[in-house]
Amino acid sequence: MAATNLVNAEHVSKTFGTRIVLDDLSLGLSRGDVIGVVGRNGDGKSTLLGILTGSIEPDTGTVTHTGSVSIGVLAQAEIPGPQQTVRDVVVGGRPDHVWASDPQARPIVEQMLADIDLDALMVELSGGERRRVGLVALMLGGHDLLVLDEPTNHLDVEAVSWLAEHLRQLQSRGVAMLIVSHDRWFLDEVCNHIWEAHDATVDAYDGGYAAYTLARAERARQSAANEARRQNLVRKELAWLRRGAPARSSKPKFRIDAANALIEDVPDPRDKLELARFSATRLGKDVFDLKDVTFTLPDGRTLLNRLTWSIGPGERIGLVGVNGAGKSTLLNLLDHQISPTSGRIKQGKTLRIGHLSQEVHELDAGTELGQERVLESVQRLRQETKLATGEEASASNLLEDFGFTGQRLVTRVGDLSGGERRRLQLLRLLIEEPNVLLLDEPTNDLDIDTLRVVEDYLDGWAGTLIVVSHDRYFLERVCDLTYALMGDGSCVLLPGGLDQYLAARRRRESGPSKSQQVGQAAGAAGSGPSSAELRRARKDMSRLEGQMARTQSALDQLHQQMAEVATDFQALTDLQGQASELENKLGELENAWLEAGELVEEP
C-alpha cells in the first residue's frame, strides 16, 4: 500500500464461529478518499469498519494507522453518560457567545441542532436526536478520518442534502471518510470510491454510486449464469439512472455513450400507461378525495390547513417535508386510523390498503406472530400470489428475493434482527395484494440489494402508491409525482421534484420572502449566471465533449496497440508514456467540463 495511506489493512481475515466474514483482505485509504461501503446485511460491512478503526481485532493479518491519525466514529448506537448535556458533547461545554463566534461550528450546530436545546441531557433525547448530536460532534472534532455508519438515518431530505454539501467541504480539506449507507443518492453525491463487501471479500470501484452501478453491470454481464438475477436488477437500475432524474445526467457525453451501449436493449423500468389502465380496473375512478381537511395537534399546532386534494388510480406519489411537518399523520388520515379535526376524507369503495408504518412492534418476540417461524408466517397469509405481470410467485421465492434462505426460513420471527423484521414486514404487506400502498420510510434498515428487489417489485405493481421517505434515490426511482408538506399546513405539488423543494427551503430559510408557495419561491429570480454566461458555458461544454471524445478514442487505440505488442517491453514502455499523457489530458478536460457544467443543468 502507498506510504501516504492513513489506514492500511494487509492480508486481514475474520471468522465468527464457522462463518468466514473477511478472507485475506488487503486495502487502504488516503487523505481525501471518501469511500462508500455497500453490500447485503451480514456481508461484513460493520466488521470491516471495526477492523480498520481498531475496535475489532482480525484473526490474521495486520492493520496499521499512519502517524497520529485521528479517527472519529459514528456508530449506529450511542450510549451517553447520565449527566452529559448536548453542549458537553458538541462544543465541549463552551457558552453560546464562544462557540457561535467559531465560523466552522456555528453553521453546523444551527443547521443540524436547530430544534434541540444545547443544555438538554443526552439521556432525555430520542434516538434520532442523539444520533444527530453525535454526527455534529464528529464533524467538529477535527479528525483525519470519519467513519460513518448510516449517517442519514433520522435526517429529512433537506438535512441529507446539507450534510452532503458539508462533507464535500471536509473532503476538500483532506479529511478521509468511510461511509456505510443504503442512501444511494447520498453515496453518489459524496463518494469518490465504492467498496462492495460480498462473499468474504471486498471489490473496489472508482467513482460514486452511479459509476459503481455501471462498472458492476459490466462485470455482471461477463459473470456466470447463476448471477443472471442480480445482473438484470443492476442493469435495470442503470437504465433508470440514465433515463431518470436530470441530476443523474451530468456526466461527460462520451461516458454517457458507454452507458447507453450497455442498456440499449433494456426497456424503461415500468410501462406507465399499462399500469395506469390496470390500476383503473382494480380501483375504479376514486381513490382518495380530501375536502377542506384540517388537522390540529393538542398543542395547537396545525399540520394540515384546509387541504383539498384528489388522488386517483395508479398515481405514484412521493411525500417530503421536514421532520414534524405531518407526513406520517397524513398517511394515518388516509388510512382512517385517525380523524381530521375538520373536513372530510372519502375513500373509494374497492380500496384494499396496505400501510407500512415505521414501527415493527407486531413482530416482537412477545407477540403471537413473533413466535411463528418466518416461512410459516408468510405461508399462512398466502401460498401463492399473482404479481401485476400475471406471473405466479410462491412464498418461498419471494422470501428468497427478500434475503430469507436456509436457516433463516425456520427462525422465529421475534428472533430476527431489526433489519430482517423490516424486510419481513414489507414482504407480508406486499403478498396480501393491496391495491393502495402507503409506505412510511420503507427503506429503513434495508440494504441496497434488497432495495433493488423492492423497486423491481413495485415496477410491476398496479395501484396507487404514496411514499414518505428521506431516501431521495428511492423516491425518484419509484414515484412519478412529488408533493411537499411545507410545515405551514400546506401541501404543494413540486413539478421540479426534490431539487425544487430544496431550492424553496433554502430561500425560505435565508431570504426575507414570506411566500407560502413552493413554485413562487423556487421560481423567484436569484443571483445566478447571466444569459450570456450560460450560452458561453454551453458552448464550452460542447467543445470540451468533442475534445474528450477524440482523446478517449486515441487512448482506446493506444490500449489496442499495447495489447498487440505486449511481449515487446521497449515498445510497450513507449506506448505507456503516450497513454499517460493522454490520460492526464483527459482528466484536465473533464475538470474543465465539470466547471462549465456547474453553471448549466443539462436537460
Image (spheres, grey):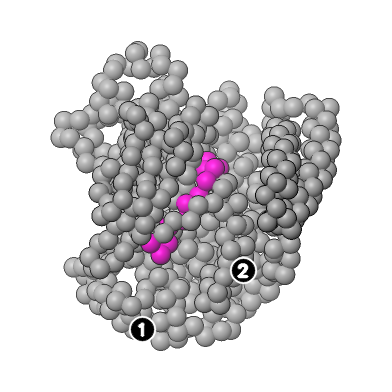
Where does residue 527 sit, x and y in percent of width and height?
69, 24
Q: Could you tell me which residue is drawn at 63 percent across and 41 percent down?
A: 500
Where does residue 539 sit, x and y in percent of width and height?
84, 35
Whole-number angstrom distance, CA of label 1 to CA of label 2: 34 Å
Give SS at disc 2. Answer: helix
Give SS at disc 1. Answer: helix
The residue pinned by badge 2 equals: 221
Q: Could you tell me which residue is drawn at 47 percent across and 52 percent down?
A: 195
Q: Taking the image as drawn, is residue 380 in sight?
A: yes
Where does residue 588 sit, x and y in percent of width and height?
71, 34
Count residues near mark 1 (Cα–Cα under 10 Å), then give few for <14, some for 14-19, many for 20+: some
Q: Which residues are magenta?
A: 189-200
Q: Which mark is residue 108?
A: none
Count residues near mark 2 (Cα–Cα under 10 Å), then give few for <14, some for 14-19, many for 20+: some
444 left or right of 260?
left
Quarter of the image for residue 391 reads bottom right
